[in-house]
């Protein structure tokens, strides 16, 4: 049974390991995955703890559906207090790790303390060992994974690991599994590094009994047909996420030269079709790969065609790498994008944060705020591909003054650099914005401003807002499973009803993350994809747990409130430029300079934005400062947090 | 009509959904250790090859079984194990040249592909068609066609290069 997967508490300081069942009442309140992790984080960390100290708690989990006969239950969730933002740290990755963890008997790991010397965990069929990792130190993410398989003599072991960036406590180091799957954001790799934890390896052969196998199998088939029939997923399965880059760039939604432009011109070499050509040339006609049980297969395979890393195999590059190593630094070579992608994969660093922070430094260099003295002679100008790739390595190994400075993340770096450098840092809550430009889309701007883990598109982005769906279709989507009859607008430039869309998507994505499935399988890029109603069935068929769509919505809302409570406890205040629900001034003050007619000249209206945030808080039952009211907490059953149920 | 599983591993994305649905279909349990099909992987090269029973004509497992527990199904032509007769000696596991005869430690039984009684779930769920259920004597036709396409493509490239050179 999925419901009998356990939770393990691992204290790396003392070496004490304890495993316990997860009570059904806890499942009903938080389901699993990110939702239950949010509960555990709020309950198992003390206010103000040092994110890189032994008191921070690292949570690793699969969702309630992980490894069941539901579609694409590949996602692993990782949570801790973030060393990048000082607020909620949370990252989610695909691959094959979480299902293997579930077959090894576990859904949740609570990792505390700090090992005296480098270690890794080996979890297999209900057993947990802490093993010496001395021989793994300094190895890249893939070297580490293959070395563990060799040491333990089992090719089927799946590991989530850190690379040199995590060991060097780069504050946006990620955790990785496989070639490309990254728990990229908020520096979870640095948390592992701070605990002297190089890897968590799993191998499982334990049965997960499916509650209603025939129904589960049939429903999975229906689910898959629905998912693969969506045009957007067919395109994902052919071109991968780069297709989004192509469409967004031609429209004018790609930030370029840090934040100077909203479109990367003359970028034919990094268009999705060109990337696809390289994948085909180097890997053959069938070069798409996928995560566990997924029929979208959105990840391309490639070998770097030329340059110093020619012939190296990697996967991707996805949308984010195109922005990070293409548009933002204004580099227009596919080889640079493919190489940058490969370097961060090997080093174990968030591609988004890396590209974004280097592009910021490039703008500072252009402005003279940084000079060749700070860059140790590196000509860090926009469009300098070699300098970009050199800087990636300097950050990973903290080489030179600037490498070491940027490795601490944007806000600490801006404080060290001074001279108005902060004004140019495109971030929310200390985490860099994705390279998409939200000035022409108020709903998307609200999404990144209020996202619980800092600027992020995967917490609440109403991407379908761009499709101009008829209002009745929007009402059908956004009016379930809780009724909504307030304003809604099909117009993406409007501020009307967008707060509700963002609120709805926030709950939808939390739901997905509690189940452990991928966002491409829900209302994210495709308007016709499954959500709450289908989840109710899929949970029942696979686990036997009866949850109505409304109850799943309530779980999601409850867990989002827990994340909010955590952020508030760690110092979030509404208008704080470094820790609040707001945007860099350039969103309000600098109109878009390129793009389609609906984008050119666009910027976010400060007053309307403020009203949108007000509405967003109202939908949540939060006061004007964004704090959940006593009534809201009671409605959610959170009035006694921390309640230490588990 | 005898049909068999045709695997075109180049198309495999490595998602292992076939392993999942195989174990759910047969045992009502999710566990790749119970799957009749297994995707062998060389992740560092991006190479994935699904492996399952070939339903051999002159099946070594059938030949070697000391108690004659292994026979061929008359309708669908797959090789099957009679558990009332099987003594669990695992000689069939040892002798199979493809590793297609498996052993499950929990149930203490050997197990192999039975084509799901004519509706193989691995095929049904493989959207990229890396595995298909086709008439046994048609496989070479598909192979011929694939090879012919490659020949044609090569010829076109060659003539394009020739034109460019001229």
Image (cartoon, grey):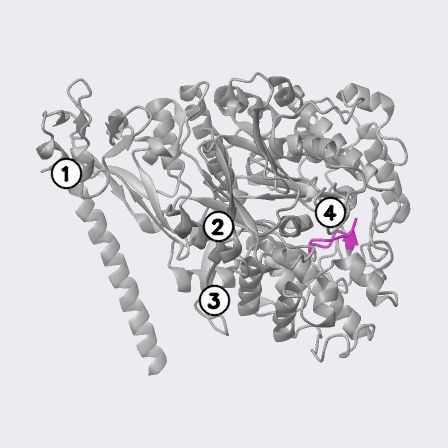
Q: Earlier in the sequence, mark 2 or mark 3?
A: 2
The magenta span reads A427-438
Vertical relation: B125 (above or below) B25: below
Q: Quadrant of residue B92?
A: top left
Q: Which residue has dot 3 on it?
A: A304
On the rendered structure, is A20 left or right of A365?
A: left
Mark 4 secondary-structure assignment: loop
Q: Residues within 10 Å of mark 3 (few under 14, many from 20)?
A: many
Total marks in image: 4
Residue ID for mark 1: B56
Does residue A504 appear to the left or right of A63 in the view shown?
right
* Residue linked to disc 4: A51
Write down the chain letter for disc 4: A
Foreground: disc 1 or disc 2: 2
Mark 2, residue position? A178
Q: Gap in Å between the C-alphas at discs 4 and 2?
A: 26 Å
**Local secondary structure at mark 1:** loop
| Badge 2 density bin: few <14, some 14–19, many ≥20, Cα 10 Å | many
**In the picture, residue A210 is in which quadrant?**
top left
* Viewer-nearest of discs 1 and 4: 4
**In the image, what residue occupies the spot 70% across and 78% down?**
A379
Separation of residues labelled 2 and 3 (CA atoms): 18 Å
Residue A263 falls inside the magenta stretch: no
């Amino acid at each position: 049974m999925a419901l009998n997967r356990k939770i393990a508490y691992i204290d790396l300081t003392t070496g004490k390991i304890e495993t316990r069942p997860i009570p059904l009442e806890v499942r009903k309140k938080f389901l699993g995955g990110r939702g239950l992790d949010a509960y555990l984080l709020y309950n198992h960390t003390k206010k103000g703890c040092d994110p890189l100290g032994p008191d921070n708690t690292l949570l690793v989990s699969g969702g309630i559906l992980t490894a069941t006969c539901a579609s694409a239950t590949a996602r692993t969730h990782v949570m801790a207090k973030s060393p990048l933002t000082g607020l909620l740290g949370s990252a989610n990755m695909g691959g094959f790790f979480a299902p293997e963890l579930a077959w090894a008997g576990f859904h949740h790991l609570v990792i505390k303390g700090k090992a005296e010397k480098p270690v890794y965990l080996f979890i297999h069929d209900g057993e947990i060992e802490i093993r010496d990792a001395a021989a793994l130190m300094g190895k890249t993410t893939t070297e580490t994974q293959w070395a563990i398989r060799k040491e333990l003599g089992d090719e089927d072991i799946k590991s989530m690991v850190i690379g040199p960036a995590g060991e060097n406590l780069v504050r946006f180091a990620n955790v990785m599994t496989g070639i490309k799957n990254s728990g990229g954001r908020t520096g979870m790799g640095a948390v592992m590094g701070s605990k002297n934890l190089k890897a968590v390896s799993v191998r499982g052969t334990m049965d997960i009994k499916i509650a209603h196998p025939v129904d589960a199998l049939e429903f999975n088939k229906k689910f898959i047909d629905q998912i693969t029939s969506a045009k957007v997923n067919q395109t994902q399965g052919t071109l991968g996420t780069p297709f989004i880059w192509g469409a967004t760039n031609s429209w004018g939604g790609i930030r370029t030269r840090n934040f100077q432009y909203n479109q990367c011109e003359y970028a034919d070499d990094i268009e999705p079709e060109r990337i696809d050509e390289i994948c085909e040339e180097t890997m053959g006609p069938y070069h798409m790969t996928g995560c566990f049980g997924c029929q979208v297969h959105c990840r391309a395979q490639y070998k770097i065609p030329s340059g110093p890393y020619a012939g190296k195999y990697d996967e991707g590059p996805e949308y984010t790498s195109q922005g990070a190593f293409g548009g933002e630094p204004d580099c227009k070579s596919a080889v640079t994008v493919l190489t940058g992608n490969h370097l961060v994969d090997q080093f174990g660093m968030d591609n988004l944060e890396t590209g974004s922070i280097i592009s910021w430094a490039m703008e500072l260099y252009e402005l003279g705020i940084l000079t060749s003295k700070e860059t140790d002679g590196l000509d860090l100008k926009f469009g300098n591909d070699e300098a970009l790739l050199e800087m990636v390595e300097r950050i990973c190994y903290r080489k030179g003054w600037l490498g070491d400075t940027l490795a601490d993340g944007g806000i600490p770096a801006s404080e060290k650099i001074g001279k108005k450098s902060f004004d140019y840092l495109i971030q929310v809550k200390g985490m860099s914005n994705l390279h998409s430009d939200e000035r022409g889309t108020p709903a998307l701007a609200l999404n990144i401003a209020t996202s619980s883990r800092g600027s992020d598109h995967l917490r609440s982005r109403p991407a379908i807002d761009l499709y101009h769906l008829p209002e009745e279709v929007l009402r059908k989507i956004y009016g379930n499973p809780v009724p909504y009859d307030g304003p809604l607008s099909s117009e993406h430039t409007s501020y009307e009803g967008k707060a509700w869309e963002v609120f709805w998507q926030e709950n939808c994505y939390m739901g997905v993350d509690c189940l452990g499935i991928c966002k491409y399988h829900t209302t994210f890029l495709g308007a016709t994809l499954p959500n709450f109603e289908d989840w109710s069935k899929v949970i029942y068929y696979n686990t036997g747990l009866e949850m109505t769509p409304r109850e799943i919505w309530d779980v999601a809302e409850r867990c989002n409130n827990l994340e909010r409570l955590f952020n508030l406890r760690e110092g979030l205040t509404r208008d704080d430029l470094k820790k609040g629900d707001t945007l860099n001034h350039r969103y309000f003050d600098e109109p878009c300079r390129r793009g389609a007619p609906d984008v050119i000249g666009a910027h976010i209206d400060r007053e309307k934005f403020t009203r949108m945030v007000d509405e967003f808080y109202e939908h949540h039952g939060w006061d004007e400062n964004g704090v959940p009211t006593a009534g809201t907490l009671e409605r959610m059953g959170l009035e006694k947090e921390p309640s230490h149920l588990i | 009509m005898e049909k068999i599983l045709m695997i075109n591993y180049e198309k495999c994305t490595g998602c292992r959904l076939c392993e999942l649905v195989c174990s759910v279909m047969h045992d009502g349990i999710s566990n790749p250790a119970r799957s009749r099909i297994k995707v062998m992987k060389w992740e560092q090269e991006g190479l994935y090859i699904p492996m399952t029973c070939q339903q051999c004509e002159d099946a070594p497992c059938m030949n070697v079984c000391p108690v004659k527990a292994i026979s061929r199904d008359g309708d669908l032509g797959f090789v099957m194990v009679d558990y009332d007769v099987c003594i669990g000696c695992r000689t069939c596991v040892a002798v199979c040249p493809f590793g297609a005869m498996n052993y499950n430690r929990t149930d203490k039984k050997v197990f192999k592909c039975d084509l799901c009684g004519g509706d193989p779930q691995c095929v049904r769920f493989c959207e990229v068609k890396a595995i298909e259920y086709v008439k046994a004597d048609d496989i070479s036709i598909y192979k011929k066609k694939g090879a012919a396409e490659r020949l044609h493509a090569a010829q076109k490239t060659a003539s394009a290069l020739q034109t460019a050179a001229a």
